[in-house]
């Protein structure tokens, strides 16, 4: 099973913010050919960095992370989702 953590949990509105997405294999076996796409809700824009990874393999307990820069157009709660 893959655990997904996005940090920080809070960003300031109308300010460019760096966000880290971390995938960790919390299962007991190796997970191969991971495909993960992140959907940005209305009001949250990706400015830089990938919103999708593919072909990654993770051994048990192994993390994989990447960063992106985003901007929230206004204050509020934004839920990031993935079709995967």
Image: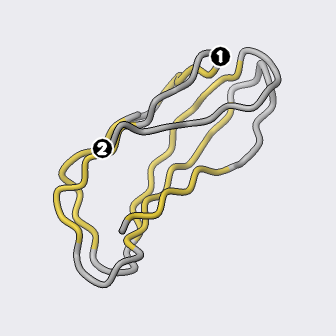
Image quadrant assignment for residue 78: top right
User: Which residue is rendered at x = 37% and y = 71% of the image?
Assistant: 25
Q: Secondary structure at mark 1?
A: loop
Q: Position of residue 84 (x, y in %)?
A: 33, 43
Q: Is residue 44 left or right of residue 33?
A: right
Q: How far across and down, in percent of the image, does residue 42 sit?
A: 59, 16
Element under disc 2: strand
Find residue 46 and report its horizontal and vertical position in percent. Answer: 52, 24
- In what quadrant of the picture does the N terminus appear? bottom left
Name the residue nearer the viewer: 50 or 77: 77
Colour setting: secondary structure
Q: Is residue 24 above or below residue 18?
A: below
Q: Which residue is mark 1?
A: 43
The crowd level at tag 1 (other Cα within 10 Å; few <14, some 14-19, many 20+) is some
Identify the residue under disc 2: 53
Image-based side of 34 in relation to 72, left or right? left
Q: Is residue 1 above or below residue 40?
A: below
> Which mark is first along the chain, 1 or 2?
1
Instruction: Please name whichever residue, 83 or 54, is drawn nearer the observer in this view of the structure.
Output: 83
Front: mark 2 or 1: 1
In the image, residue 40 above or below residue 1: above
Residue displayed at 79% across by 26% down = 76
Circle 2 Cα neighbour tier, 10 Å, few/some/many (<14 / 14–19 / ≥20)? few
Disc 2 to disc 1, C-alpha distance: 23 Å
The residue under the point 50% across, 44% down is 67
Q: Label 1 near label 2: C-beta < 8 Å?
A: no
Left or right: residue 12 versus residue 57 is: right
């Amino acid at each position: 099973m893959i655990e997904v953590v996005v940090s920080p949990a809070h960003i300031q509105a109308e300010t460019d913010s760096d966000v880290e997405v971390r995938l960790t294999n919390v299962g007991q076996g190796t997970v191969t050919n991971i495909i993960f796409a992140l959907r940005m809700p209305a009001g949250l824009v990706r400015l830089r960095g990938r919103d999708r990874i593919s072909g990654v393999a993770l051994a048990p307990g192994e993390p994989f992370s990447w960063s992106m820069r985003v901007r929230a157009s206004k204050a509020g709660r934004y839920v990031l989702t993935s079709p995967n």
